[in-house]
């Protein structure tokens, strides 16, 4: 389900010409998990470069299974 949601988000960001990092790799990693549960990590913001990172953690909260980033809307 998350892969589907974030593939739509990627299309929206692409249409808005928003800078992105790691979307294809993150979507591939999420799809490869099939029906396995993942947890959304808290979105992390960085100042330089200004990106918002979204982490996807395994069910045990011990490993990052995917990560993507997007420039903030006001960039």
Image (cartoon, rainbow, N blue to C red):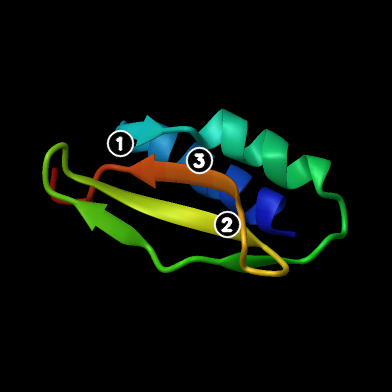
Query: Would residue 71 appear left or right of 56 to someone viewing this image?
Result: left
Are the residues tagged 2 and 1 within 8 Å (C-beta)? no
SS state under label 3: helix
Mark 3 or 1 closer to N-term?
3
Question: On the image, which quarter does residue 31 sit in?
Answer: top right
Q: What distance separates the C-alpha of mark 2 from that of mark 1? A: 21 Å
Q: Residue at x 84, y 60 (%)?
A: 36
Question: On the image, which quarter does residue 48 sit in?
Answer: top left
Q: Which residue is mark 3?
A: 10
SS state under label 2: strand
Above or below 53: residue 39: below
Q: Which mark is residue 56?
A: 2
The picture places residue 51, in percent across and down from the top left corner, at 25, 45
Query: Would residue 37 appear left or right of 19 to someone viewing this image?
Result: right
The picture places residue 63, in percent across and down from the top left corner, at 61, 55
Q: How many marks?
A: 3
Q: Which mark is residue 33?
A: none
Q: Which residue is mark 1?
A: 18
SS state under label 1: loop
């Amino acid at each position: 389900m998350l892969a589907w949601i974030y593939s739509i988000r990627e299309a929206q960001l692409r249409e808005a010409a928003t800078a992105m990092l790691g979307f294809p790799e993150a979507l591939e990693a999420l799809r490869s998990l099939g029906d396995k549960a993942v947890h959304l990590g808290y979105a992390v913001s960085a100042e330089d470069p200004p990106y918002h990172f979204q982490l996807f953690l395994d069910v045990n909260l011990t490993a990052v299974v995917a990560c993507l980033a997007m420039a903030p809307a006001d960039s």
